[in-house]
Amino acid sequence: MTVRLRDVAARAGVSIATASRVLSGGDAGGVRAERRAAVLAAARDLRYVPNVHARALAGTVTPHIGAILHDVSDPYFSQIMRGMQRAAADAGRLLTMCNSYRDPERELAYITLLRSQRVEALIMTGSGLDDRSYSEALAEQIGAFAAAGGRPVFIGRHHVAGDAVLPDNVGGARALARALTALGHRRFAIVSGPERLTTTRDRLAGFRAGLAENGVDPAAPVVVGGDFSFTGGARAAAALLDAGTDATCLFALNDEMALGALHALRQRGVAVPEQLSVAGFDDIPAAAGALPALTTVHLPLEEMGALAVSTALASRGGELRVRHVPATVVSRESVSWQMPEV
């Protein structure tokens, strides 16, 4: 027998209108907590499944969130997705994830596809791109989505107006530079990321600012290009060794590259941190379990994902909402004290 909305309402002891408000994905802010809990419990007990097709005909959006991210195999994004999935499930929303693999054209195509699915919210997860034509195309797509009643949210810095969850990439990198120089390090090598990504530029700018504040020439570190992957970090570390680097500390702009660097250094017989200290950024789960454990900058990745969902689903006001997320240095065994030069 098909379970109907009136059956759920009767089981919960509420009106059909109240049950609809709780289960429709709309604003149920006026429903008391105990009634909302009773409706959700009744729906679960009766195994009620809403008629999404009928709802789509009656409204402008469906209780469905679309998330576009660079690569879910990257632990940075997988941790954020965990938080998004938890928050979406708690809110009774379906979450669809799309991998763009940092391809701008693929990102724009996914936005078009998700708009056709009439998603309620769209979360762009990952760094923005310093590219004018892409930013203009993205702004056009996001503007049309918002005008139709959709709720866009960005995780990371983008050149498009919208609600945002912004990790403190600049401040975290600056704090790391201060911590490393306080340990006596003066010669650095940096494994960078894709140069057009705002995350790359922000972390580089913050690290250089921290060096300058502590008397180190911000232009002095050797910078080797990377791609935010484990393999890219290993390749960059090997290139630095082949070039005869005299750095006492290697800073990789994310943990995946830092872990790749640790692997390459171990293969080449370079002791960490005795011969070369290594630091990363993000504090993914593998960082604490590395050998040696990785000094890094902690971002609350799961919380960022959950915050993006709650921001998208919150009652909207007239102003854009920007949620700033702090970044903190976590000191572990991969960095050691460096005797000052005389």
Image (cartoon, helix red, strand yellow):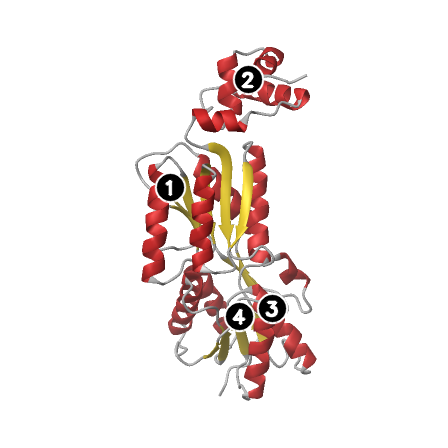
Disc with the residue nearer the chain's start (2 vs 1): 2
What amino acid does circle 3 point to? Phe
Depth check: give the residue in front, 333 or 237.
Answer: 237
Spot occupied by residue 310 in the image (x, y as percentages of width and height): 48, 38
Q: Secondary structure at mark 1?
A: helix
- Residue picked out by circle 3: 230
Spot occupied by residue 93 in the image (x, y as percentages of width and height): 54, 34
- Residue picked out by circle 1: 145
- Residue picked out by circle 4: 252
Between the C-alphas of marks 3 and 2, the distance is: 49 Å
Horizontal side of 293 relative to 246 (left or right) equals right
Q: Nearer the viewer, mark 2 or mark 1?
A: 1
What amino acid does circle 1 point to? Phe
Between the C-alphas of marks 3 and 4, the distance is: 11 Å
Between the C-alphas of marks 4 and 1, the distance is: 36 Å
Between the C-alphas of marks 2 and 4, the distance is: 51 Å
What amino acid does circle 4 point to? Ala
Q: Secondary structure at mark 2?
A: helix
Label 4 crowd (10 A; few <14 / some 14-19 / many >=20)? many
Spot occupied by residue 94 in the image (x, y as percentages of width and height): 56, 36
Q: Secondary structure at mark 4?
A: strand
